Amino acid sequence: MIATGTSAANAELMTNAVAVRGRSLWVDARRRLFRNKAAMVSIVVLALIALTAIFLPLVWPYAYDDIDFTLVNCAPDWWPDPDVMCHSGGWHIFGSDSVGRDLFVRVLYGARVSLAVGLVATFVSLVIGVVYGATAGFIGGAIDDVMMRVVDVLYSLPFIFFVIILMVIFNQSIWLMFIAIGAVEWLTMARIVRGQTLSIKEKEFIEAARAGGVSQRGIIGRHIVPNVVGPVIIYVTLTIPSVILSESFLSFLGLGIREPLTSWGVLISEGSNQLESAPWMLIFPALFMAVTLFCFNFIGDGLRDALDPKDR
Amino acid sequence: MLSYAVRRLLGAIPTLFVVITLTFFMMRAAPGGPFDTQRALPPEIAANINKVYNLDKPLIVQYGLYLERLAHFDLGPSFKNRDFTVTELIAQGLPVSARLGILAISFAIVFGVTLGVLAALKQNRAADFGVMTLAMIGITIPTFVTAPLLTLVFGVYGLSVFGHEIELPVAGWGGGAPINLLLPVTVLALPQIAIIARLVRGSMVEVLHSNYIRTARAKGLPNRVVVWRHALPAAILPLVSYLGPAIAGLLTGSLIVETIFSLPGIGRYFVNGALNRDYTLVMGVVIVYATLVIVMNLISDLLYAVLDPRVRLDK
């Protein structure tokens, strides 16, 4: 009989279906991300920059604060313009700066500082933003109104000015800068997390899970968190470059990292003062910074496409 | 709409108040004062100066005095530039910053919209990718990198056009001469061009796929009319609401540009004022900036409501 045949086939299908493992959101996202060439190249480049910045200074023949007054503003040996004052020779592949320090190792130190600021300040903004946003979204009601009203007011403040004032006040301590920038960047994070929490909490599948007897912890862990994490990860990758920019901006104005330690902003600022005599002092740090910012932006875009495909 | 505008302006007062209070106490928390010199002043003289500027009174009293002055639209005397009031300094600097900003945003709108429309019309073709790559570069590379790089290319190496060596001035205001403005305005406009191009491309692509555009084409309207009369007005609407934040972006950008090109705008006052503990000057500039941001946001919201009949402000 046809009916039994079908049901037998169905039954077989069902048995087979059990063998097929379901693909989770994360597996899907990873596959989409791996297929995104720009993002993958960016990840590799970024990893290279980070690893070089961490390990190469350990074995490099010059330290970041080795001053050599015989090598003031010297071009690297391979510099195409023959009209430079001197060539630095040796391992100074990026030339030397206005007190004869090796520019290459200084650019790497700049990378250390810039990346560290990016990570720490973003982490600060992540913690504040997620806790604040999740609290507001989860509690809801009047408390939510008040908390978000505070965010609105803070949004309309010219924040970069407060960071500048903070840096002036607290004598440009590097840790304070991490915190100050992070404290500025948490607002958007809080809004994103709150919006997500608010909308997910009301969704039918949460209702269904609750009706099916899933525990509160299970609901938060299996259903709410994965749905909030996506946008948060995307925003984190976009926050890191904007934090690096803020730090460089401050350092450029002379309010950030202090000598002899350095960051890309400091190097770019020094380079733009030596523009005519030593353009390599501007070009290399600017190049490193631009490449890094590009990478973060491409990774951010890639992650957005991977985690939130409907937004393409 | 009028009542909405009034309500928004009233709503801005607490924001401004928070800005003023925060800035006031933050500046005062900074170690050092405006009259610190290399050698300590004799105590009598220091006491006298402090008395003249009310610095001897308790902080909260000084705060009250400042607010009272502010209520009369008086920003007080500058602590460092002794012969000037803050109002005078800002009156000198603001026209410079404003001219930079207005020129930059005008350029940005013209070029950004043109590029965005172009990219949308050639969607997923070479021109589109070209424009979007440029936009990515414009958004990623910060002002303080483009400024020195452009200076290097156009100012230092010079540019030869038709055999003429053109060297643009790399610093100074020159009484607002166009040639002095060229580099700073370009640097300020570049990131805005990039953002606007992206924005316009996105909305234009969406609009071009909508039903009424298909209707317009079905009627047999020439492409030119469809694009410029029917699609563009709808597509640049998001631009209107971007202009508020854009002004804020220009302000921070002008901090950098004014420093690099040594232009006498108010951005430079702010940085120097903060470093010199010129309390009143910093307060003055922050108040001007905050007011600008608030007013521009309001204007762009109102404009949006005027242009888009679907938006109703009065609830």
Image (cartoon, coloured by chain):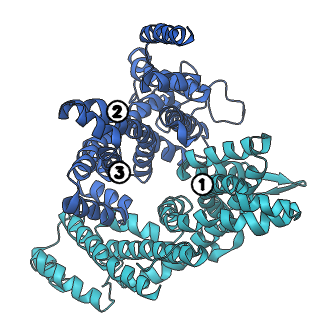
Instruction: Name the residue located 60 percent from the left edge and 62 percent from the top edge.
Output: B171
Q: Which chain does the numbered disc 2 sit on?
A: A
Select label 3 or label 1 by which is in front. Answer: 3
**Which residue carries the number 3 mark?**
A195
Query: Chain B hue?
Result: cyan
Q: Nearer the viewer, residue B305 or B274?
A: B305
Task: Label 1, secondary structure: give it.
Answer: helix
Residue at numbered disc 1: B195
Relative horizontal placement of residue B26, taking residue B80 as reference (left or right): left
Q: Amino acid at mark 1?
A: Ile
Amino acid at dot 3 = Gly
Residues behind callouts 3 and 1 on a single chain:
no
Residues at marks 1 and 2, CA–CA distance in whole angstroms: 31 Å
**Residue B215: horizontal and vertical position, in percent?**
79, 61
Q: Which colour is chain A painted? A: blue
- Judge left or right: residue B72 versus residue B231: left
> What is the crowding at mark 1: few (fewer than 14 residues within 10 Å), some, or many (at least 20)?
many
**Which residue is identified by label 2?**
A226
Question: What x and y, as percent, mark residue A26?
Answer: 42, 25
* Mark 2 Cα shell of 10 Å, populated few (<14), some (14-19), many (≥20): few
Q: Quadrant of the C terminus of chain B?
A: bottom left
